[in-house]
Amino acid sequence: MATVRQRRVIEVQLLADGGLKSSATLIGELIKDKDSITTSAAESVVRFSTDQDEQGLADILAKLTASGQRVSQFREVPMDLEDAFMSVTKEAEASAPEETSS
């Protein structure tokens, strides 16, 4: 039986967009999937996908604030049913053995 690992989308809203690049760089040093990091200057937001637990997320927040970033919100973006289904099917496809034709 396959296990499903929860990937979470986290949104970090900064007080101003001036720290977006440095925040994204710092987050990239702390998570595995660096390609999941996106920024929005219009919203002053950095978003990333991770499988970090609560302790790992708390460490990311602590390092952001210790580096001088002014974080106004740090939250998990709720996953809708379609996102959950796509996540499960993607995991199932990735772990399925490839078929060979004879």
Image (cartoon, rainbow, N blue to C red):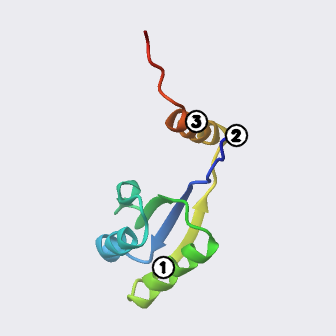
Q: How many labels were placed on the picture? A: 3
Of discs 1 and 2, which sits in the foreground? 2
Q: Which residue is mark 3?
A: 92
Q: Position of residue 67 (x, y in %)?
A: 38, 88
State the SS at label 2. Answer: loop
Determine whether 97 is above or below 88 in the image: above
Q: CA distance from mark 3 to mark 1?
A: 36 Å
State the SS at label 1. Answer: strand
Which quarter of the image is occupied by the C terminus?
Answer: top left
Residue appearing at x 63%, y 36% in the figure = 85
- Say if mark 2 contacts mark 3, CB within 8 Å: no
Q: CA distance from mark 2 to mark 3?
A: 10 Å
Which quarter of the image is occupied by the N terminus?
Answer: top right
Q: Position of residue 51 (x, y in %)?
A: 55, 60
Q: Categorize mark 1 by other alpha carbons within 10 Å: few (<14), some (14-19), many (20+).
A: some
Q: Which residue is mark 1?
A: 71
- Say if mark 1 contacts mark 2, CB within 8 Å: no
The type of residue carrying mark 2 is: Met
Q: Which residue is mark 2?
A: 1
